[in-house]
Image (cartoon, coloured by chain):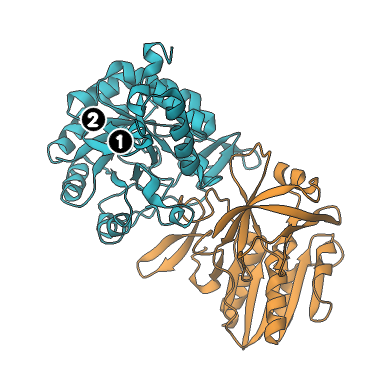
Chain colours: A cyan, B orange
């Protein structure tokens, strides 16, 4: 088997030439990172979260570094769906990579309207973000309440014919239960995890660092937690998983595949190493060749006795 | 923009608080005054890079003026010639030096860093300028500047702040360039707006990506419908005083 065949994978109805993608919110719409590498090497790009109307975002401070982790409270700042359609889709279409549109709303109706707009546009998949921890309304509410999640996925599924991915929050008692609901409501795939809810307090002022108190935690510090969530979800559902959470090396990526991911997303670690996706892809090429096994067979192998 | 490995050529103390690092300038990495790099040392236990203004550059070298404020800047100070850093740059939009009027450069503490390269650029242009540099106590870094057209304020030696020097010389028909602590920048901005003098302020903010992708380094800027958040790393770090929406 050639290298290209070994790397091929699918997330639901979405066929990817390789499993390396980038996580929503860490990559803008690709323009900045296109200065460092050819975006065509990526299996897919999940773009910065989109809303119907432009969002101003949260007042600073928006960032706080922790040991090997990052707390963020950006608040979905984005110029709205019209801008995305007019400027960003044509930009990304210059590259040979799949476009995943990450959508956000305050209400079920907003989610439905936004997804129905984007379903008519030239994107390859829609990622329903029900797990943003950094907005006052909507956001994570839909991802942490079972009934709300069901209603959100049902509403979006009713208008989306493209590949529908639901991005889950790890801030729940049983992420497997949430994944089952997504599968029951017809989601094609599940992406996980979004950021963990966390906070920091300024010891001089004695007050929380962030205006909304809570913030989203990402980075290598969350990797073992995220990996376990992927492992658990893989056992619970049949639909494929786009796994992410603290991936910062080729080995991390392989771990996520073994735990059950059909594809992986790199995020926070790209801030210090913008070439990380290139390095991970190179690593996966040699890894699959050495193991004489394609990504599709490595996916979930930790559940089936590993490489023995 | 590039992300490359660069060799440290020298590390030199400038008093207790400050030091300077000279790096090999990566080929084709050219900075205009006010632009910055984000760096990471090879064995860094940190997740994120750290942004530093490029204080000046020559054909072969980049000079960074650094204040020891945390673990990273402490570690960096102990590095030796020959050690390597990962350097990303040039980042951000620097000062607009297309004006003709006399320039007043006002800096506080380590904020004087980008003003060094700016003063060198103004020298090259033959444009008239005056540097006002303020320090809490130690003022060793001021030695990097030309002695002519330089005034120094030390808070431990004289009453008031460096902005008092600005008050003395601020008049119509000048342009102000500033970098330093937030209270200083806010004071400079209001003084300039009152005097009807244009100002360019170089801001500092915590950054994650440094290239405009994560939108983590937000600063409120005025627009038609109120305010919007711009990115310090890529829309700035230099902003016009008039456009900032600070209370």
Q: Residue at x 70, y 44 (%)?
A: B72
- The residue tagged 1 is A130
Left or right: where does residue A233 sit relative to residue A61? left
**Location of residue B20 in the rendering, given as x and y in whole percent from the top left corner:** 78, 58
Residue A242, horizontal then vertical, whole percent? 34, 32
Q: Residue at x 29, y 17 (%)?
A: A236
Q: Secondary structure at mark 1?
A: loop
Q: Is residue A164 left or right of residue A35?
A: left
Disc 2 chain ID: A
Give x and y (percent) for residue A77.
38, 52
Q: Quadrant of the N terminus of chain A?
A: top left
Task: Tell me the chain of label 1.
Answer: A
Camera-nearest label, 2 or 1: 1
Residue A267, compared with residue B37, is above or below; it is above
| Image marks 2 and 1: residues in contact by CB distance under 8 Å | yes
Residue A160 seen in this snapshot: yes
How far apart in space, not on screen, are marks 2 and 1 (Cα)?
9 Å
Give the quarter of the image for residue A231: top left
Foreground of the two, B8 or A169:
B8
Instruction: Give SS at disc 2.
Output: helix
Find disc 2 in the rendering and name its residue.
A148
């Amino acid at each position: 088997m050639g290298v290209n065949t070994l790397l091929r994978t699918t997330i639901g109805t979405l066929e990817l030439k390789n499993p390396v993608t980038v996580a929503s919110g860490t990559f803008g719409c690709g323009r900045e990172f296109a200065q460092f590498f050819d975006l065509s090497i990526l299996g897919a790009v999940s773009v910065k979260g989109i809303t119907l109307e432009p969002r101003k975002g949260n007042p600073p401070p928006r960032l706080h570094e922790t040991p090997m982790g990052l707390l963020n409270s950006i608040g979905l700042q984005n110029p709205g769906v019209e801008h995305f359609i007019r400027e960003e889709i044509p930009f990304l279409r210059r590259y040979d990579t799949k476009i995943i549109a990450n959508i956000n709303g305050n209400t079920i109706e907003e989610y439905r309207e936004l997804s129905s707009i984007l379903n008519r546009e030239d994107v390859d998949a829609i990622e329903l973000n029900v797990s943003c921890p950094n907005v006052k309304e909507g956001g994570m509410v839909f991802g942490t309440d079972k009934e709300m999640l069901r209603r959100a996925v049902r509403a979006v599924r009713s208008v989306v014919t493209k590949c529908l991915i639901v991005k889950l929050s790890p801030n729940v008692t049983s992420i497997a239960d949430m994944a089952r609901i997504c599968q029951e409501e017809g989601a094609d795939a599940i992406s996980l995890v979004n950021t963990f809810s966390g906070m920091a307090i300024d010891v001089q002022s004695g007050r929380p660092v962030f205006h909304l108190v809570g913030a989203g935690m990402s980075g290598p510090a969350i990797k073992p937690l995220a990996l376990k969530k992927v492992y658990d979800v893989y056992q619970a559902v049949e639909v494929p998983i786009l796994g992410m959470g603290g991936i910062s090396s080729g080995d991390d990526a392989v771990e996520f595949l073994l735990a059950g991911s059909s594809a992986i997303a790199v995020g926070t670690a790209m801030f210090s190493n913008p070439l990380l996706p290139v390095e991970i892809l190179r690593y996966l090429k040699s890894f699959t060749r050495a193991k004489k096994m394609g990504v599709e067979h490595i996916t979930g192998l930790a559940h089936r006795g590993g490489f023995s | 923009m590039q992300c490359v490995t660069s060799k440290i050529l020298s590390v030199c103390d400038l008093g207790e608080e400050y030091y300077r690092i000279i790096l090999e300038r990566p080929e084709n990495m050219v900075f205009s005054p006010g632009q910055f790099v984000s760096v990471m040392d090879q064995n860094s236990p940190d997740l994120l890079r750290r942004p530093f203004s490029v204080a000046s550059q020559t054909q072969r070298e980049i000079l960074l003026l650094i204040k020891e404020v945390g673990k990273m800047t402490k570690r960096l100070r102990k590095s030796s010639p020959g050690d390597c850093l990962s350097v990303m740059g040039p980042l951000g939009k620097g000062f607009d030096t297309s004006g003709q009027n006399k320039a007043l450069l006002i800096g506080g503490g380590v904020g004087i860093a980008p003003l060094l390269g700016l003063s060198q650029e103004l020298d090259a242009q033959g444009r008239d300028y005056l540097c006002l540099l303020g320090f809490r106590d130690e003022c060793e870094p001021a030695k990097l500047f030309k002695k002519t057209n330089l005034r120094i304020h030390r808070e431990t030696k004289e009453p008031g702040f460096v902005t008092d020097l600005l008050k003395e010389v601020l008049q119509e028909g000048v342009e102000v360039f500033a970098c330093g602590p937030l209270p200083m920048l806010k004071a400079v901005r209001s003084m300039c707006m009152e005097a009807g003098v244009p100002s360019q302020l170089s801001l500092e903010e915590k950054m994650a990506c440094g290239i405009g992708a994560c939108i983590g380094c937000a600063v409120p800027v005025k627009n038609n419908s109120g305010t919007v958040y711009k990115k310090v790393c890529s829309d700035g770090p230099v902003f016009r005083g008039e456009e900032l929406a600070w209370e």
